[in-house]
Structure formats: structure tokens, C-alpha cells
Amino acid sequence: MSKLRIASILFLLSTFFLKFSSMFRDIIIAKLFGNSYVTDAYIAAMTIPNALILFMLTGMKDAFLPSYYKYSQLGKGFSHLTNIVKGTFWISFVISVAGALLSPLFIPKLYPDFNNHGTQIAIWTAVIYFLSVAIVGVNAVYEGYFDAQKMFSFSTFSQTIVVLCTIGGALFLHRPMGIYSVPFGYFVGTVFSFLIKLFYLGPRRFIDWKQPMDREEVISFYRIFLPIGLTIAVGQVNLFVNTLFAARLGEGAVSTLNYAFRLVSIPQAIFGVTIATIVFPLLAEAKAKNDMALFKVGIEKGLTYMFLFLAPTVAGMLVLMKECVQIVYERGAFTASATAQTSEYAFLYIGSVLFYSIQAVIAKGFYTLEKGHYMLRAGIVSIIANIIFNAIFSSMIGAAGLALSASFVGLVYSLITFTTLYKITGGFRLSVIGKEYGKITISTLAMVAVLLLVKYELHADRLAIIPYLAFMIVLGAAVYFVALWVFKVESVKEILTKKRRKEVS
């Protein structure tokens, strides 16, 4: 078994664990605080610094990997790592201090409908998260470094540590600290994640402490990073816009939309982001070799494998949405009425999962070619579209319209990015992609038909919820796999047949 396949399997498993941990964190928050104004205030406030955090984490990884490869070929990989770590620390530190100091000023203006207690919660939540940014910036560089070494699972593990500390804070400190226990746990997790990296690499391999920072090299890197980071932040900007709209729609709208979005985004994070991350080093290698044919094949395979895993998962969630929400969230402060509302929003969010997963693979192509500015342009269009769709749909159907808007925006964003990359690269084999997508879609529809028959005609939903979900998941997977085999889906052959795996590799 090749090192890349082992790394890919470990990364997939670690991603499953990360998303399970993230979902468990949301379960704990839902159980302890429900969809009350307290949760609304926490989620609304953390959205702002969280945009910066994801800007650093995801954007840095996407920009650093090809940059590190370039300097490594010149024998300057460690020197480049040192420069970017030092430069990023000072930039992150300034942002961290400024954000913490300004939070008491801009939070009340952004969320004027919150009561006094809610406003105080929002302010201190934002302050704590902003204080984490300085450490997050350094963590982000090293996670990009570990990805460059094809140590995907270690990078994911360090993020899991942060989530686990957040969970621990909520579980053990919610009585004395209330909702503040959640951001406090996050801050502790970022520090712990940093210390793990320092211990693993050791002081000598961490950075060259005596090397003076090369400002020109840092500036040159950030010229590439900023369009990528801003593009990554587009999703968070859209989420922030959604939060501003939701905060004006009454208590519970912000938190309920957040619970729905978190649930349906699991397939995107596991399959869309995982496959995009695994494909990225292969695209970077193709770029380094100036092999455009190999680059195109990498994009095609990434899109196909992503859809192979994502389509049945999303379709299965549509059939079992209410049961999924019920088993995940409905306990403690999260009531049956909250389940019904969350299920409705989650159903409308589902289109965004598919479209943003496609965009995740396409984005790696732009970043590899160092053409992130195209993604930024598309991102700006998506922000404008999001504001327009939010205004239209929320006025028509309330908070549910914000979830529907996300799916429409995802469609617009993925269409723009795919067609742009298609023109830049001279085109992909659309007939090959279309043929695979067609067979996968038919197989997915066959699975859905069987599940609906069993659910409504054979009344399998009368079973207890856990046996019911387990039975439906196993049945759906079996029907889907048989359908893939009957329709001779090429992607399945490539995964299961040793000879074909070698050819793809």
C-alpha cells in the first residue's frame, strides 16, 4: 500500500473523528442551552472572529502548500517556514488585540435587537475568540506544513484537540461560567494544540529561532495568501450576513439555523473537503512538473470521487432528515418543536452542501495555478447574490428563506468557479464527468426509491428510532452499492480494483 493511500485513509478516519467531535460539541451546546437568546448571542458573536480564524486556518493551508513546495525545490523549505511563522505571528497578534479591544464597540451596533444580557454575552464571546487569533495564525502555518508533508491526519488531529477542549469547557464549566465556558474551552484548545506541535517537532525543528525575518519573502507570500484567504472567508462572510438577517427574526432564529447548517454540512466536510485536500498535493505536483494533462485528470477525479460519496449521503439525509435532527439534538433544552423547525431549515440547506463541495475541489485548482484572484471575484459576486437572495426569501418565508438562499448562492458560486477554471485550463472531459455523474445519480435515485418504499409503504418508521436509522442506513448503502455495480460506475472499479488503483495513482 502506497504512503499516499495510507495517508489518505488516516486522513479520512481523522476527519470522521473531527466531524464527530464537532457534532458532539453542537449536541452539548444544544442540550445545555437549546435555541435560546443565550445561544443566539454566542453564535452571532463568534461568527465574526471565526471568519478570521477560518481565513487563517484554511486559507493559510491552501497558500502555504504550493509555496513551501517551491522553496523546498530550492533547498529553502525550512527557512521559508521560519519566515512565514514569524510574519504570521505578528500579523495575527495585531488582529487579535485590535479585535478584542473593538468588540465592545461594534457588537451592540451589529446586533441592536439583543437584550442587555445577550449583548454582554456577545461582547465577551467575541473578545475571547479574538484573543485566540494570535495562536490560531501560527497553528495554521504548521497545519499547512504538515499537509505539505502529506501528514494530513496530524493536521486534523490538532484541530480535533481544539474541539475536544471546547467540549470539555462546556461540560465541566457550564455551571459556574454558563455559555462563556464554550469560548473559554476553545481558547484553551488553541493553546494546547500549539504546544502539541511544538513538542512534536521539538524547538530545533520548529523554526530557526536565530534567523531574522525576511520581510520581502513574507510580503511576497501574503500577496498570494490574501486573495486565497479572502476567498475562503467568503463563506464566513455569507454566514455573517445570514446571522445579521436572522438576528432580526426573533429569538431562536440564529441558533436554529446554525444547528441545521452544522448538521447538513457534515457530508461536505467529510467527503467534499477531504477529497479536495487529498487531491491538492497531486495538483501541486502536476503544476511543479508543468503537466497540465495530469492537472486536469486530478480535477476530474476529485469531482467524480466527491460526488460518488456525497450523492448518496445527501439523498439519504433528505429521506431521514427529521429522524437525524431528532437523534442528534433532541434532548435537554432542545425540544420537539425545535426539532421540527431545525428539520425544515436543514432540508432547505441541503443544496448548498452539494454545490460548495464541488466548489471545494475547483478551488484547489485555482490555488494550485496561483490564480486565487478569480475565486475572489466569484466570491464577491456570491456575497452580493447572498444579500439579494436573503432579502427576497426572508421577506417571503422568514428564517427558512435564509437556508434556501444558501443553496441558491452555492449554485451561483459553483457555476461561476467551474466555468472560469474550465476556460483557464482549456477545458475538462465533460463527457467523462457527465457519464459518471449520470450513473451515480441513477444509482442514488434507485436507493432513494427503495428507502421511500420501505419507509412509507412498509412503515419501517414505526420502529424505535435507533434500530430504524441503522436499518435504513445499511439498506441504503447496500442498494446504492449494487446499483453502482450494475451500472458499471468507473470510479468504483478504480477504488476496488488493484490494477486500476495503480493506473489512477
Image (cartoon, grey):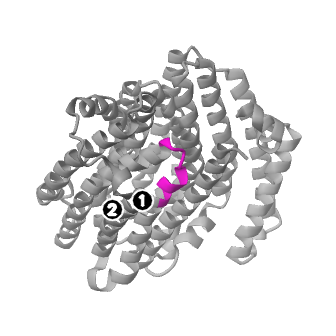
The residue under label 1 is: 258
Residue 43 circle label: 2
- At 25% from the left and 65% from the top, the residue drawn is 125
Q: Going by the image, does 25 lie left or right of 390?
A: right
Q: Amino acid at mark 1?
A: Asn
The region drawn magenta spans 148-157
- At 18% from the left and 57% from the top, the residue drawn is 107
Reply yes or no: does residue 197 show up in magenta: no
Q: Going by the image, does 490 lie left or right of 401?
A: right
- Work out which quarter of the rendered image holds the C terminus and state it: top right
- In the rendered image, residue 233, in percent from the top left (x then y), is placed at 35, 42
Counting the numbered discs, the total is 2
Magenta stretch, overall SS: helix
Q: Are marks 1 and 2 in contact (CB under 8 Å)?
A: yes
Give the quadrant of residue 78.
top left
Residue 133 circle label: none
Q: Going by the image, does 41 lie left or right of 499?
A: left
